[in-house]
Image (cartoon, helix red, strand yellow):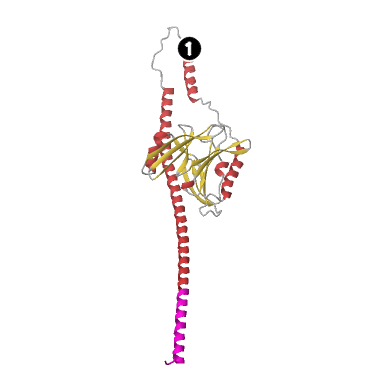
């Protein structure tokens, strides 16, 4: 049997080395491809996460604007109704005070003109004085609450656990000291409402764990209570809260109130009470990186846009009991 030549052996070894090199190259290339695919997937997930964050921020801003617009429209309607009612009442009071008595008094022939004049002088001023009299005492405001309430809001800001803070003041039990109402969270799904009061130099929590989902703070003048009113996807809700001087409790609720837009929402909830928007300051830190800004305010039922950096406690410093 003829032995293979040296050239054949070299060719065989060369081919074998090429095959081994090709297999190694393919394996390395496959590993690089898989690694690149994983990196691309990671980047894609990061982009998707950022997109979701941006979308949540946009949804939150849109929801806030819709809620505020609803507040504005509702307040316009309430103010118009209240103005018409006051004008009508004033006209009725004026008419009653000035309407002459058409009944001729039965007098003796001896009645003097001076006696008649004296009687008229007594009747008219007395009636007017009763109409104008208002003996309701104004509540005395304890201004010491201002700095402690501001410090409480700063605790929320510095906690690093929330990206939105809405805070309001309202004297819920009419003792001259307003309660601090805070709605805070990272999105509409986890907003929670807490109530605080100022007692003996300290800020004391008097209620917490209440839902802040798609709602805003109002005062129901017909019940004399705070009411969180809101709506989502055409279904409205109302939740009333009462403070007995010790604890805040939910005093009542109405759910599944149908509506189609902000105007119809105001009409839908009108039969349930006389609602007035409570002055509120809206703070946002969408990225939760410590860069807070004032989105705006609700003042006297009107939304005022701001977008100024930082935070603003002027509503606390300038508080006046409007209810």
Residue at 46 percent of width and 42 percent of height: 216
Between 298 and 291, the one lying in front of the other is 291
Q: Is residue 302 magenta?
A: no
Between 295 and 46, the one lying in front of the other is 46
Q: Where's residue 12, x and y in %? A: 44, 86
Looking at the image, residue 302 lies above or below residue 88: below
Q: Which residue is mark 1?
A: 115
Of helix, strand and loop, which one carries label 1? Answer: helix
Q: Is residue 13 magenta?
A: yes
- Quadrant that contains the N terminus: bottom left
Q: Local crowd at mark 1 within 10 Å, few (<14), some, or many (≥20)? A: few
| Residues shaded magenta | 1-28
Among the 4 quarters of the image, the one containing residue 263: top left
Looking at the image, residue 45 lies above or below residue 99: below
* Main SS of residues in magenta: helix
Q: Where's residue 98, x and y in %? A: 43, 23
Q: Where's residue 10, x and y in %? A: 46, 88
How many numbered discs? 1
Q: Where's residue 86, x and y in %? A: 43, 31
Residue at 44 percent of width and 80 percent of height: 19
Q: Residue furthest front?
A: 1
The reply, left or right, for residue 314 in relation to residue 54 is right
């Amino acid at each position: 049997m003829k032995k293979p030549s040296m050239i054949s052996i070299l060719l065989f070894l060369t081919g074998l080395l090429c095959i081994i090199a090709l297999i190694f190259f393919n394996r390395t290339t496959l590993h690089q491809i898989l690694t690149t695919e994983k990196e691309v997937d990671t980047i894609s997930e990061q982009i998707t996460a950022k997109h979701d964050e941006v979308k949540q921020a946009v949804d939150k801003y849109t929801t806030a604007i819709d809620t505020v617009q609803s507040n504005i429209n509702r307040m316009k309607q309430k103010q118009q109704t209240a103005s018409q009612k006051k004008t009508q009442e004033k006209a009725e009071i004026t008419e009653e005070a000035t309407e002459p008595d058409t009944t001729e008094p039965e007098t003796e022939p001896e009645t003097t003109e001076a006696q008649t004049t004296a009687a008229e002088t007594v009747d008219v001023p007395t009636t007017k004085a009763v109409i104008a009299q208002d003996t309701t005492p104004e509540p005395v405001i304890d201004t010491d609450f201002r700095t402690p309430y501001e410090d409480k809001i700063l605790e929320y800001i510095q906690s690093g656990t929330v990206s939105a803070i809405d805070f309001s003041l309202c004297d819920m039990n009419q003792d001259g000291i307003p309660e601090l109402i805070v709605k805070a969270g990272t999105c509409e799904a986890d907003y929670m409402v807490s109530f605080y009061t100022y007692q003996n130099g300290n800020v004391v929590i008097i209620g917490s764990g209440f839902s802040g989902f798609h709602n805003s703070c109002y005062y129901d003048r017909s019940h004399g209570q705070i009411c969180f009113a809101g709506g989502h996807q055409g279904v409205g809700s109302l939740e009333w809260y009462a403070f007995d001087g010790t604890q805040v409790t939910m005093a009542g609720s109405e759910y599944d109130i149908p509506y189609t837009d902000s105007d119809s929402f105001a009409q839908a909830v009108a039969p349930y009470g006389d609602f007035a928007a409570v002055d509120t300051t809206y703070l946002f830190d969408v990225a939760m990186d410590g860069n807070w800004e004032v989105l705006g305010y609700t003042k006297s039922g009107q939304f005022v846009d701001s977008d100024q950096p930082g935070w603003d406690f002027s509503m606390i410093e300038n508080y006046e009991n409007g209810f």
